[in-house]
Amino acid sequence: MNTIENKVAAVPVTEELSLVRAAKQGDDAAFEELVRRYDRNVFRIAQHITQNREDAEDVVQEAFLKAYGNLAKFQEQSKFYTWLVRIAVNEALMKLRRRRPERTVSLDEDIKTEDDSLPREIADWSPNPEQLYNQSELREILSKTIQGLPPGFRTVFVLRDVEGLSTEETAAALDLSVPAVKSRLLRARLQLRERLGRYFQKRESGDGIQ
């Protein structure tokens, strides 16, 4: 990578870090700018995890309040956004625990599924042009399909494939190893392919979504 590319790649992090350091010094406007930059992203992540708009809004408020109250503890070894996402994910998981006390929701334990071993090779699941007739409907189908994933898979998929975090950033945000993130992401993608494939097969046969 040449010098110009290095400089361009570093700009967003430098601006973010500059805002964080200003906020640490008591500049509320700097923290408000961080909120403005990231609140929608954090909301989307929280909504994917909690699957409830009001809970997601609560998570966003709590996450930014905790981030603000703990700014001094942020050691600047990762992006502020990665650190913020980790706080938000923890808040969202706590919401789920309170809602479903009989089931512990955790990202620290392995998730057992029907395809615990790698599934058989799956036929190409991509919809054909006729099936892409309505992009908004396809987005709704995909959103519902993502919601059907186990929480651990869903969270990794949302951070990595929906929000665009790198594998390393996703691992840092969720306190997981890079191999664990890769494994869960692969399983999430395979499950989505299978579920979407079943949907389109049903659609072609006239049965509609299950």
Image (tube, grey):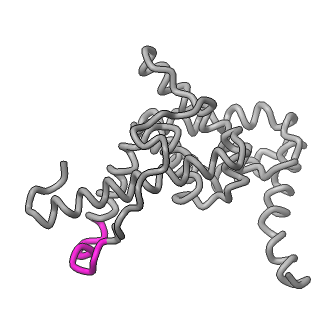
Rendered location of residue 186, percent (x, y): 53, 54
Residue at image position (71%, 38%) is: 175
Q: Position of 153 compared to 124: left or right?
A: right
| Looking at the image, residue 27 lies above or below residue 129 | above
Q: Which residue is drawn at 67% across and 36% down?
A: 87
Residue at image x 71%, y 50%? Answer: 81
Q: Which of 71 and 182 is in front in this view?
A: 182
Q: Look at the picture and state if 172 lies above or below 15.
A: above
Front residue of this view, candidates 125 and 3: 125
Side of 10 relative to 96 (left or right): right
- Image coordinates of residue 184 in percent, x first then y, are 55, 47
Q: How many marks?
A: 0
Residue 24 as seen in the image, left or right of residue 155: right
Q: Is residue 80 magenta?
A: no
Furthest residue in direction top, as rendered: 102
Residue span colored magenta: 127-136
Q: Quadrant where the N terminus lies?
A: bottom right
Q: Where is residue 91 in the image (x, y as percent from the top left)?
A: 59, 31
Q: Which residue is drawn at 63% across and 48% down?
A: 181
Report the magenta stretch's main SS. helix
Please state if 73 lies on the left or on the right of 164 as rendered.
Answer: right
